[in-house]
Amino acid sequence: MSVNTPTRDSFSNKFGIIAAAAGSAIGLGNIWRFPYVLGESGGGAFLLIYILFVIIIGVPVMISELLIGRRAQLNVFGAFRKLAPNRYWNLVGVMGVGAAFLILAFYSVVAGWTLQYVYLSLTNALSGRTPVELKAVFENVQQSGGISVFWTLLFLGGTAYIVRSGIEKGIEKYTKVLMPMLLVIILVLIIRALTLDGASAGLNFLFNPDFSKITSDVILEALGQAFFSLSIGMGVIVTYGSYIKKTESLGGTALSVSLADTLIAVLAGIAIFPAAFAFDMAPDQGPGLVFITLPNIFNKMVGGYIFGLMFFILLTIAALTSSISLLEVVVAYFTEELNLSRPKATWIACGIIGVLAVICAFNSLVFNVFDKVSSNVLLPLGGLLIVIFVGWIMGAQKPREEIEADGRKAHYYNGFLFVIKFVAPVAIALVFLKGLGWI
Ligand code: PHE
């Protein structure tokens, strides 16, 4: 096994870590899923609860995952095997690897749609169309079966290609360039969206909370979305944490990544809702929101062709930097626990995910089940067990030692400990049980 040898691959520096971890966090979850889930869940009130969850649950879970990974220097399954007093905790690792398969399956399908939109933009098939026609284009893409499988598998192949090359020369190299580009494009889109007639209704929807819209379902959705968007609760961050050098700050990393992720989600909302309202489109139309509203904006823009094309290219890239982190969870597990070579592990994982993805592409029920079960069940459950593990099982010394391994005193440590011991577990458990209708 290549475990614990000095040759274990790692990120080269702080920017590399943040680009990779933010690359994982920022993806379809921010630009595709966040706006439509918010749209279906009533707008501003959802945003408030979402941000609250990111602060009181997201950041502490992320720090916990980072410290587990860096302490163990192993994949998520191996990490629990090494650090836990008994083997039942390995189940958290098993659940994480399982969640990676499910998420990647439906994620690749949406990324496939995105790739197909790159093609449609390139061939100018979206310009000059009315809002109604654009809606029909999306429905076609969604129901195209075989064609959709082609783009999905192409995307999965690209993911495998990068993961196969390792951490510094694969994941880090690409994310460092691609993530800053994404930010620039979103800012340009926001300027156009905000200068459309009737844009203010969209901003109202996003920022004016209507508390009558809050139900236990909405709260569970917000929790699930926070976990999904931050890539926490299933071992991506444990795995990436294992590639972070001891000299780097874990608290700082978690904070920067969570901030960047939330910022991009809110920015995506600012780009999308004003446009949706300006074109008289309902904000609660589900998964089609981004694929239908944004082409409408591009049609109204000077240079819409090039911006539209760039947007879908960058969305594909955002999806890619997330999907590589998901695949890395499985590949790290296969190489370290099953002793497979990296290329072999990558292709085997991809083969299994490919089959699941094809099922998702043809069957929207399976697609929805994979999405909801992973975001609203597996990730919160994983997060709950992770904070309990760090707060109650790892012992008083180890978490602190790992957080302060960079030589700086963590003044926030006692607050962090209080949150992961009491606040986060109780909050996750309550939302979870209530959302499932058990209390
Ligand atoms: N956070 C990613 C996104 O927002 C999706 C993801 C979920 C990635 C879970 C890894 C783990 O698109």
Image: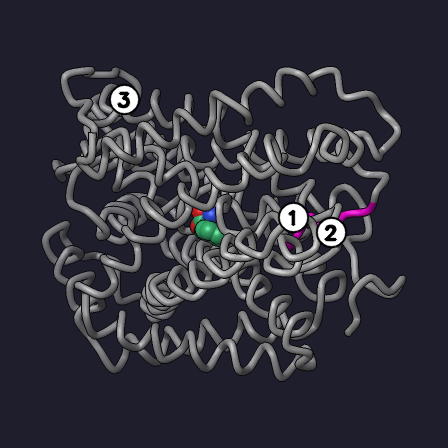
Q: Quick one: quadrant of the N terminus?
A: bottom right
Q: Residue type at mark 1?
A: Pro
Spatial separation of the CA atoms under disc 1 and disc 2: 13 Å
Residue under numbered circle 1: 85
Residue under numbered circle 3: 44
**Residue 76 vertical position relative to residue 377 in the rendered view, above or below:** below
Q: Taking 24 as reference, is 130 left or right?
A: left
Please state the horizontal and vertical placement of residue 174, each as a whole percent of the image: 66, 60
Q: Looking at mark 2, is its residue's CB closer than 8 Å to ligand 1?
A: no
Q: Secondary structure at mark 1?
A: loop
Q: Quick one: quadrant of the C terminus?
A: top left
Q: Residue type at mark 2?
A: Ala
Q: Residue type at mark 3?
A: Gly
Spatial separation of the CA atoms under disc 3 and disc 2: 40 Å
Outermost residue toward the front in this view: 86
Mark 1 vs mark 2, foreground winner is 1
The image quarter containing residue 119 is bottom left
User: In the rendered structure, which segment of residues is drawn in magenta?
Assistant: 239-245
Magenta stretch: includes residue 254: no
Residue under numbered circle 2: 72
Looking at the picture, the colour scheme in use is: one colour
